[in-house]
Amino acid sequence: MGFEEKAHTADWALRVWAKSLPALFAEAARGMYALSGANQAEGPKVKRTFEAEAPDAESLLVAFLSELVYAVEQEHLIFDEFDVQVEGIKLKVEMSGAPILSLTKAIKAVTYHNLQIRPTARGYEVEIVFDV
């Protein structure tokens, strides 16, 4: 599993890879937080469940990451533990996190620009572009 920032002319782009689709979703979340320089405050953990249904895995990924962007903007929360379940067109994520200690730059939105989850020899890979 892993992620790396990709060069992009106006926005931020991230390449993510993992052995399974659920691991890809969790790693995408970690990568998104790393790009924005998000750090958690110490203290009690907040637990949350996110569920979605969408026509494809790419739409599920955008819905999930968009929910995390909302949590940063509106609730000042970031999550660091993810139990992701993907079954066809349904997603369920049990996650825990804490309030934000610091944030370098906010992400405005998760885009569909060239978004395609691809199976590879080592699992799955995706490139995600974020509007900043």
Image (cartoon, rainbow, N blue to C red):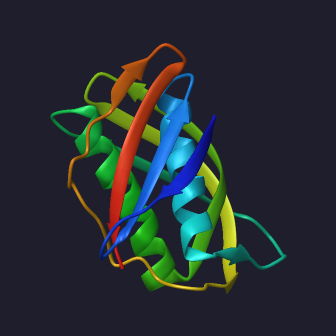
Residue in the image at 26% along x and 37% along y? 116
* 45 to 59, vertically: above or below: below
* 114 to 108, vertically: above or below: above
- Residue 119 as seen in the image, left or right of residue 89: right
Residue in the image at 41% along x and 28% along y? 86
Q: Position of residue 60 (x, y in %)?
A: 30, 42
Question: Quarter of the image containing the C terminus?
Answer: bottom left
* 61 to 70, vertically: above or below: above
Can residue 48 be seen by looking at this rendering?
Answer: no
Residue in the image at 62% along x and 61% along y? 79
Report the residue that reaches farthest toward the top: 121
Instruction: Count up the numbered dots.
Output: 0
Can residue 99 be seen by looking at this rendering?
Answer: yes
Quarter occupied by residue 91: top left
Report the residue that reaches farthest toward the right: 42
Q: Position of residue 13 (x, y in %)?
A: 40, 60
The residue nearer to you, when weighing 6 against 54, is 6
Quarter occupied by residue 31: bottom right
- Residue 14 as seen in the image, left or right of residue 132: right
Q: Position of residue 9 (x, y in %)?
A: 31, 72
Question: Quarter of the image containing the N terminus?
Answer: top right
- Residue 103 as seen in the image, left or right of residue 44: left
